[in-house]
Image (cartoon, rainbow, N blue to C red):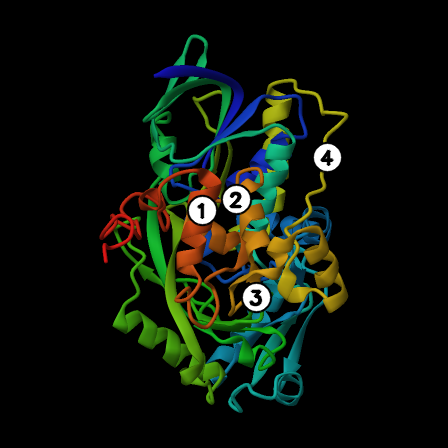
Amino acid sequence: MSDTSYDVIVIGGGVVGCAIARELSRYKLRTALLEKAADICAGQSKANTAIIHGGYDAKPGTHKAYYNVRGNQMFDTVCGELDVPYEWNTSLVVSFAPEEDSAIDELLERGKKNGVPGLQVIGHEEILRREPKISKDARRALLVQNGGIVCPYELTVAFAENAAKNGVDFFRSSPVTSVKKGTDGWHVETLSHTFTCKAVVNAAGLFADEIHNMVSDDKLTIKPRRGEYYLLDKKYASSFHAAIFQVPSAMGKGILVARTVDGTTLLGPTAENIEDKTDTRTTTYGLAKALSGAQKTWPDLPTRAFITSFSGLRAHCDRDDFVIGEVSGAPLFFDAAGIESPGLTSSPAIGSELAEMVAKALNAEKKPDFDPIRKGIPKFRELSNEKRTELISQNADFSKIVCRCETVTEAEIREAIRRPVGARTVDGIKIRTRAGMGRCQAGFCTPRVLEILSEELNIPMEDIRKSGAGSRYVYGRIFEGKESA
């Protein structure tokens, strides 16, 4: 094993870990991020509701309430700097039965206590005026003006790319096996390296309890909570304007119907406590529950429009709140643990404040040359014909459509590989370009994506993975060369 020394090690490459890394890159600190998977954004950050939550739901006085509201307020700046698509399309939390009406008033009061601006309660007629396809059983709704939608994987990638641009080193396929305090600082071991550092930030998602418990006697327990979803074709993108929530329960915010920034529509999630932190199966029971729940909101839901189903896992902590800050008895070890919903919304604020904590503890100064700007890969599908012609004149690979469903070009795929913290897997291409996310769900474009990855990375196609170990597409060649006549 080699020994690598840093000022700060961030453990975890989800949206929170990458947000922290980006904020740490503002300071004169040598920082590295370790991710156990083959790519960043491989866990709960890529499989969630993609909502910018207003902040009305969290219990007043909790970390969830504080970071949700502050994070929400940062999205205009963050997404502007990082060129990430988002939209303030509002949210509606709707009651569909008399016994649910009082919950709307309770959420209104909770939101006011949390400092959420612009909340109001609307009635049956106004709900139907705003959302004609909603169930006629809709009675009352909390209108959340600062509710929005964002692309969660593009936000994560943007945080990472900007962090790398400003000096952060990324180590993927680097699961942490041990964290120990030594005389020269913290020792963080992976399968291939032993890192030493002054400070550690634990943003390991579902596994943040295991990392925390390596250094603290005050143990955490994180249980995975599985949510199952359906995804509808873009043909139905105009069915709803707002994200439509039902009255929440102790298990979460309930089944929603929400358009994504890319034009598809999400239905879900369910909420099921499970034991296996890697179990992202979809189930007959779970998908049936997601469907029946969504039909409560949208009775005429077009089930023939489903293009895929998937599940995501949430990191539900036994503290029932985010665990953020320096760990007692473990100086310069900082937690960002138990980050479930509204973690995506909270990520800019968690990143900013944890970086400030670490920088203050290490007496680090800000860099005068920090560059907050990151430009995304041009999206050929969104461009005018004039702009398309201009790009093709500069790079002929823009004329080669690889993913027909999403109109993704070869130039975009190659750029996704070549960028800082570039794609190394088929799923890595998918989250950076949307190649494979359309109606055919990668049925046509996968072979060409494999070829491009092989060419760009200079590795055999047999070594290309969908997402990591055990997910290869190609196992070998049937024959070499041409058959003899």
Q: Residue furthest front?
A: 485
Give the residue displayed 52% in from the left and 60% down from the top: 434
The residue under label 1 is 453
Three-letter code for the amino acid on which mark 4 is drawn: Asp
The residue under label 4 is 371
Q: Residues within 10 Å of mark 2 (few under 14, many from 20)?
A: many
Q: Is residue 174 left or right of residue 261?
A: left
Three-letter code for the amino acid on which mark 1 is drawn: Leu
For the residue labelled by badge 2, is the local secondary structure a helix, a strand or a loop? Answer: helix
Front label number (3 vs 4): 3
Q: Residues within 10 Å of mark 3 (few under 14, many from 20)?
A: some
Marker disc for residue 181 = none
Seen in the picture, residue 405 relative to 86 is either above or below; the reply is: below
The CA span between labels 2 and 3 is 18 Å
Q: Nearer the viewer, residue 137 or 71?
A: 71
Q: Nearer the viewer, residue 32 or 273?
A: 32
The residue under label 3 is 407
Three-letter code for the amino acid on which mark 2 is drawn: Ile
Q: Quadrant of residue 175?
A: top left
Mark closer to the chain start, 4 or 2: 4
Mark closer to the chain start, 3 or 4: 4
Q: Quadrant of residue 462?
A: top left
Locate the C terminus and report the quarter of the image it occupies.
Answer: bottom left
Asked whether the beta carbons under mark 1 and mark 2 sit within 8 Å of each other, the answer is yes
